[in-house]
Image: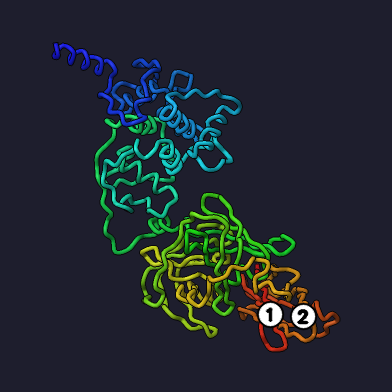
Amino acid sequence: MKKQIASVVLSVALLLGCAPWAWAEGLNNFKLTEPYHAGQFRDVSAGDWFASNVATACRLGLLKGNGDGSFNAAGNVSLAETITMAARLHSIYYNGSADFEQGTPWYEVYVSYALENGIITRTYLDYERYASRAEYAKILAAALPEEALPLLNEIEDNAIPDVPMTRSYADAVYRLYRAGVLTGYGSGGEFRPDSFVSRSEIAAIVTRMVDESQRKEFSLQKEQKSGYGATEIAALCSDAVFYIEVYDRRGDFIGSGSGFFIDSSGVAVTNQHVIEGGASAEIWLTDGSSYEVSGIYDSSEAKDLAILQIAGGGFQALEMGDSNALTAGQTVFAIGSPYGLENSISQGIISYAARQLWDEVYIQTTAPISPGSSGGALLDDSGRVIGVTCGMVDEDYAQNLNLAVPIGELASLSTESLHAFYMSHMQSLYVVRPEQSSISLSPGETAAVNIFQNYGYDGTLEYVSESYNLRVSWAEDWTDENNIPLFIRGYRRGTYRVLLNLYDENETVIASSSITVTIE
């Protein structure tokens, strides 16, 4: 009698076309209740590797066809579809069903459910676009609790070659790898976070999520390397570097640059000259999200450094390197926003580890930078930040002579007290402000720029030209003690800076600003 019962059970399993289910906790809420038959989709054949996954996902009610007789197996999955699958997974696991009444747009009900239940934490501008692999991993992993995705595989931290643990989606990806839901590509297990996922692949993924018997066993160990290449540095560090825009008290844009996080709580670094003259600032990350600069801890004009506090938290931060242990010839990478082109990476070597210029010490490097790169990160081949990119030696007379402030100089700045941006010591009662913060000239052309300062005749206003390709001079007659014309004449093509310093009677700098001059 026992043998006969066993045969009946085996027959039922064969009729279902899959292995016996190994349920864990709420996973037993998933039932094969929806109809499906072989040949239901013209683009899914019995011999396809994904055929059984498509059948199971459809019978679970997690996926459907296109309505034209096809499954669109090779098509990519949209963000809306990803959120819909995650909402259905979550609802079935916790509630035993996925009874959603669609409205307009059709995905709105799923987005609302996902927001309410923490599956996603923000809204998106375009739900119809394709979801990246990083996005679908983060969203689907949030649909089920930890007990539904128990540890199956030994995957060391940073073992997935293109997913460093510092990435915002790393926890989700490693959780799915360790649970046997994701396996990656090839023997190295790369994830390809920025590419898209096909509907055939997603069918296999959701099937593994709800059926523990379908999960894959494997292991990955971190590859031991002496140094990373540019691709790995970009993956490891890009999310910690941001683009910054600075505005005056009227809210007008006055300049942009780069910066990077040194702590996940929002403590960040940039050049002092990037934020000088500003009353507020905003940053943008690689995912398009923006955050306000809530304050300034400290800054140094001499060192050209500033430590900021960004409103928010949970940011990716760079690991600090040792700028006192650098050697000429070692490989370095620069990440910043030259000309506003955020998250641009370049590679070079250290030409001179401690170059003394203008009474300060800089790292001289061949890693290309441009205006807008100021405040960006100079990194060694382990991904540690060793300097703050700050400028170039005259590009008309020299090539690949770029400079960075050694990161060790940060030790001279304090983070003990935070000043509101508009109340920081850089924004004192006294200002020096050019009528135009940037001008364009033809070779041989002269422009007059009015400089406003509010200290009066007791103060000293000084200009400093950073290039021999500019001729700068004050007007001979000052008819207004607060508005002084400055003549600027350009000679050779390039982009240069004129620094402006206002001194009090004690020869203390009380205000600073600059003019960017482009000779075209």
* Nearer to us in this view, 248 or 426: 426
Q: Establish if 82 lies above or below 482.
A: above
Is 477 drawn above or below residue 21 in the view shown? Answer: below
Specify the label residue 137 is tagged with: none
Q: Quadrant of residue 27?
A: top left
The one of 37 and 422 positioned closer to us in this rendering = 422
The residue at which mark 2 appears reads as 455
Closer to the camera, 335 or 304?
Answer: 304
Side of 230 where 464 appears, left or right = right
Write the residue at 33% across / 32% down: 208
Give the labeled residue for mark 1: 510
Inspect the image, locate mark 2, and give the three-letter code of the amino acid beneath it: Tyr
9 relative to 93 in the view: left or right = left
Q: Residues within 10 Å of mark 2 (few under 14, many from 20)?
A: many
SS label for mark 1: strand
Evaluate whether residue 178 shows in this view: yes
| Figure check: 361 above or below 196 | below
* Relative side of 331 to 295, left or right: left
Alpha carbon separation for disc pair 2 and 1: 9 Å
The amino acid beneath tag 1 is Ile
Percent x, y of residue 371: 58, 66
Locate the N terminus by quadrant. Answer: top left
**Residue at the (56%, 41%) spot, across then down:** 124
Sequence order check, earlier mark of 2 and 1: 2
Is the C-beta separation of discs 2 and 1 under 8 Å? yes
Which residue, as the protein is rendered here, is positioned at the far right?
479
